[in-house]
Amino acid sequence: MLNPSARYFIPDPSTWPITGSIALLCMASGAASWFNGWSPGKFILFLGVAILAYMIVGWFHTVAHESESGQYNKQVDVSFRWGMSWFIFSEVMFFAAFFGALFYMRVLSVPWLGDLEHKLLWPDFNATWPATGPGIKDPFTPMGAWGIPAFNTLLLLSSGVTVTLAHWALIRNDRNKLIAWMFATIGLGLLFLACQIYEYGHAYSELNLKLTTGAYGSTFFMLTGFHGFHVTIGCIMLTSILFRCVAGHFKPDHHFGFEGVAWYWHFVDVVWLGLFIFVYWI
Amino acid sequence: MEAAHAHHGHGDHAHHPYGIMRWITTTNHKDIGTLYLVFSLTMFFIGGLLAMGIRLELLEPGMQFWRPEFFNQLTSMHGLIMVFGAIMPAFVGFANWQVPMMIGAPDMAFARMNNWSFWLLPVGATLLVASFFVPGGATAAGWTIYAPLSTQMGPGMDLAIFALHIMGASSIMGSINIITTILNMRAPGMTLMKMPLFVWTWLITAYLLIAVMPVLAGAVTMLLTDRHFGTNFFNAAGGGDPVLFQHVFWFFGHPEVYIMILPGFGIVSQVVPTFSRKPLFGYSSMVYATASIAILSFIVWAHHMFTVGMPAVAQLFFMYATMLIAVPTGVKVFNWIATMWKGSLTFETPMLFACGFIFVFSMGGFTGLVLAITPVDIQLQDTYYVVAHFHYVLVAGSLFALFAGVYFWIPKWTGHMYDELLGKWHFWLSMIFFNITFFPMHFTGLAGLPRRVPDYNMQFADFNFISSIGSFGFGLSQLILVYVVVKCIRGAGEKVSDKVWEGAHGLEWTLPSPPPYHTFETPPVVK
Ligand code: HEM
Ligand SMILES: [Cu+2]
């Protein structure tokens, strides 16, 4: 209810949530039937994705409108900060599950498969990381750290700097600089993605490194893949913020939409550092 | 406060669509709380029906009614539906109704997202229930969906995986909402250490949920890619390990069992002082005990895995860490009893359920301690002793706490007193049939009866017969609850005062019964 005299903000009844639920129902049932060999399932899946995209655009549009029309007071702003922080914490724990799987394989399960008992079963399995596991004989070349991955690290770290410069420009109310630095940030993010796509192609075509390449392939592609997915989401969020900047949204003292996305971007950055160290480097 | 209501009296009506659209689009914490509770009650009966199917087959030795695969589907889906469909949503429903009213907030912090948290649940439930009807049927790998069983099953398994993703997203959003509400929406003067214990337990539960639900999402995602995209997380030939799944699952799973009990502790901590007419004994020790349970719950998960093979040091570590949890749990039980000590006690239905909770939950805690002893657990793992343990803590624990909460607050929510006589019948029948059902399982378990098997040796026939009869009685007794609740909602039963209970304390009891649609639009001042 929007009661201007009330101290608190409570949004109007909304159909966006139910739209999102319908989208997820389509996605889940479509994917489940597609993965099990009923190929029209993929259309249901894509329909779901389309509905979800529509919902997200509509929902955030509503939020941006509410924010710009001055309905969000200080308390709502603090709520958004708490909410975003806990959301990022949940994302950290999601990645923790995959990092946990990586450490478990490197430190425990792969060495176990190469120990004395298992020598009887698989005499010529060499349990040094990067390894596939004894049942997969297909040779592959692991991904080195100092080519594209190091360059990508540079890209993401500098994008962290540019988004901060954009933030400073916003606080100074220097709109031109703000938009320029946002452009730079998104550009760096997209360049990162392009490099990663190239890297995946290189892995598949020249290194014979695939998702199916045992322990190494599974962890390599799932970790970098989920990270890349988050970079993609981040780029989309940054772009929508850029559009809002161009449209004149945000004030020097009221711009949590911007900050929330910047936090997310830094989070994606930190995850990448973990990936660079544990997946590519050591 | 009355004046404040007169001022904003118009908030009571209108401003929301009518009919079904009211429920679909609502951003009101009371509406959403009701939706959660109705959903959870529905799932409770669906899950209960599956349990009746399990006990029917186990009534007598030999194969009577179901094929073995279908029996396993029943046990798996019973567990999944009860955990994710009944118990967890019920507690979130309580949080929705009570947290804003208890801390003097007008609503939840993210009222629109709150709606989505709820409306994801019917999607998850639809996927779960629909999975019975796909080729191969529902998942039959147990509620723990261990690999490699779960990497092999049919489409029903995929539906369960997606249901877990979606219900997990619902839990995460719900928790972010609850945490933010508690941290940011408290009325002036409501300091953290003045919060009612129910709010404290939910604050900590929400933290646990945000920490472990994403890990479950990760686990089932790995399962999905192992099933369909050729990854090798749980495949030893590819360098992975099926045991990895158990580690990731129980890293989620053990905190999860505390997620299902901590808000229950909160409810009991509201009910016991009210009917003892005394303040809660040891409030701050209750808060610290809850927090230490939550922290410890991250380092005990492998007590579910003592038989899969672990280095001896790890077994010792997990054994002692598990036993350590019994200390804060004991503190709580002590405090409840100390609260009752020399109180002027009365035993209305909420208090009966709370006392039943304390008594029977403690027995579950003791069997937990027995299971924590590694050498003993190696004998008892995967027997009915474990089934007895977790039903003592989950049914007589979480579920009885929920019942206590329903009887305690439903007069406030509906404005009408429930039928005390029927409430007492509900309690005594539940209590007696619960014990008839689950007490014999301690014996069958100690004698080695394995769980999740549709047939058994003749020697177990008598105990299983008793269990099955008890379970049918327990199932039927729950219809009383439905009758009592429906009566209250339809306005039968005498009107209650604002305070409802003589010994009640807290902000929610300063509001009218039933509370108006919007409450505390102007924050109350807490002294
Ligand atoms: C004093 C506290 C507790 C201790 C020491 C304890 C200990 C244990 C242990 C050692 C097991 C593993 C048994 C096995 O599989 O061999 C277990 C299983 C279980 N416990 Fe507890 N527990 C405690 C409290 C609780 C509570 C409060 C709940 C839930 C409300 C709970 C729910 C469960 C469940 C669901 C399982 C079985 C999971 C499965 O295998 O399906 N426990 N407990
Ligand atoms: Cu446990």
Image (tube, rainbow, N blue to C red):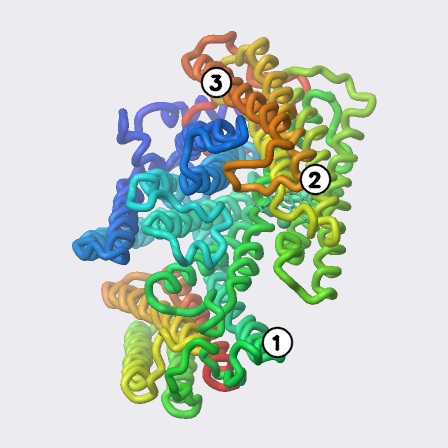
Q: Is residue A165 visible?
A: no
Quadrant where the image shows the C terminus of chain B: top right
Foreground disc of the pair 3, 1: 1
Q: Is mark 2 within 8 Å of ligand 1?
A: no
Q: Report which residue position mark 2 lands on.
A: B446
The three-letter amino acid code for the residue at tag 3 is Leu
Q: Is mark 1 within 8 Å of ligand 1?
A: no
Residues under numbered marks 3 and 1 in contact, where contact means CB atoms less than 8 Å apart: no
Q: Secondary structure at mark 3?
A: helix
Q: Nearer the viewer, residue B456 or B339?
A: B456
Q: Is residue B418 visible?
A: yes
Report which quarter residue B368 is drawn in: top right
Q: Report which residue position mark 3 lands on.
A: B479
Q: Residue furthest bottom?
A: A146
User: Which disc is residue A29 wearing?
Assistant: none
Question: Numbered disc 2: what chain?
Answer: B
Residue B50: % across, % down: 44, 32
Characterize the local packing of mark 1: few (<14), some (14-19) or many (20 or more) Cα atoms within 10 angstroms.
few
Question: Numbered disc 1: what chain?
Answer: A
User: Which disc is residue A117 wearing?
Assistant: 1
Residue shown at 53%/60% (left/top)? B248
Q: Nearer the viewer, residue A52 or A62?
A: A52
- Is A143 on the left-hand or right-hand side of B143? left
Question: Numbered disc 3: what chain?
Answer: B
Q: Nearer the viewer, residue A62 or B426?
A: B426
